[in-house]
Amino acid sequence: MTPVTQSCNLTDHFLIAMPAMTDPYFAGTLIYICEHNEQGALGVIVNRPIDMTLAALFAKIDVPLDADHFDRLPVYFGGPVQTDRGFVLHRPLGGWQSTLTVNADIGLTSSRDILQSVGREGDPREILVTLGYSGWSAGQLEDELGQNAWLTVPAQPDILFGLPFEERLAAAMGALGVSFANLAENAGHA
């Protein structure tokens, strides 16, 4: 099967799961796309906390957490790929050992040095920590978009870092000018 040719770059966009999405990993999710190119796409789910706080995660990986304002923040299920590995979505970028630059302000870092800095100095202040990520092979995301599995909208950092997780999906929908309640179960092509 030949992959669909990519017609757009969805890096720094939100994917909003349509109501008909039945995949238990992705139903009801808001995903932030960190990279999208001819080889595929990578993102993290930003509205599905797991039963773990940053304090518990830091204790588990033996990194001191001296910055109190982080201790009750939730850890998120970022997606079904590499669920044993942590990823930190953050603003500003900084100079970490392993960072995927999303845009001039936001990065996704998978190296331990960012967690050590958060624990020791509370920097960067705007973070979202996930276990795992969501990935698509070449053409896969484009196929899913063609099947009306997702809505897309340019991401807004204030939704990522300024809102509680339970408000993010509705805020992203609002950026499209759509209410989730108004979406039909099966959208069609005009």
Image (tube, grey):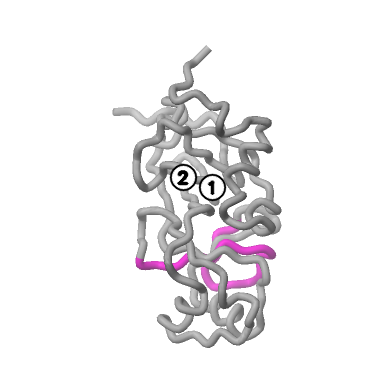
Q: In the image, which disc is placed on residue 41? A: 2
Place of residue 130 in the rendered image (x, y in percent of width and height, measured from the top left): 48, 63
Q: Which amino acid type is marked by label 1?
A: Ile
Q: How many other residues sit within 10 Å of disc 1, few (<14), some (14-19) or many (≥20)? A: many
Label tally:
2
Is label 2 in a helix, a strand or a loop?
A: strand
Q: Is residue 56 magenta?
A: no
User: Does 55 appear above or below 21?
Assistant: below
Q: How many other residues sit within 10 Å of disc 2, few (<14), some (14-19) or many (≥20)? A: many
Q: Is residue 85 magenta?
A: yes
- Residue 88, quarter of picture: bottom right
Is label 1 in a helix, a strand or a loop?
A: strand
As drawn, is 24 to the left or to the right of 116? Answer: left
The prevailing secondary structure element of the residues shown in magenta is strand
Of residues 181 and 137, which is closer to you in this image? 181
Q: In the image, which disc is placed on residue 33? A: 1
Place of residue 93 in the rendered image (x, y in percent of width and height, measured from the top left): 66, 65
Place of residue 113 in the rendered image (x, y in percent of width and height, measured from the top left): 54, 78
Task: Give the magenta-colored segment's residue range.
Answer: 84-101
Place of residue 98 in the rendered image (x, y in percent of width and height, measured from the top left): 52, 68
Of residues 128 and 21, which is closer to you in this image? 21
Q: Earlier in the sequence, mark 1 or mark 2?
A: 1
For the point 63% across and 82% down, the residue is 68
Image quarter hosting the N terminus: top left
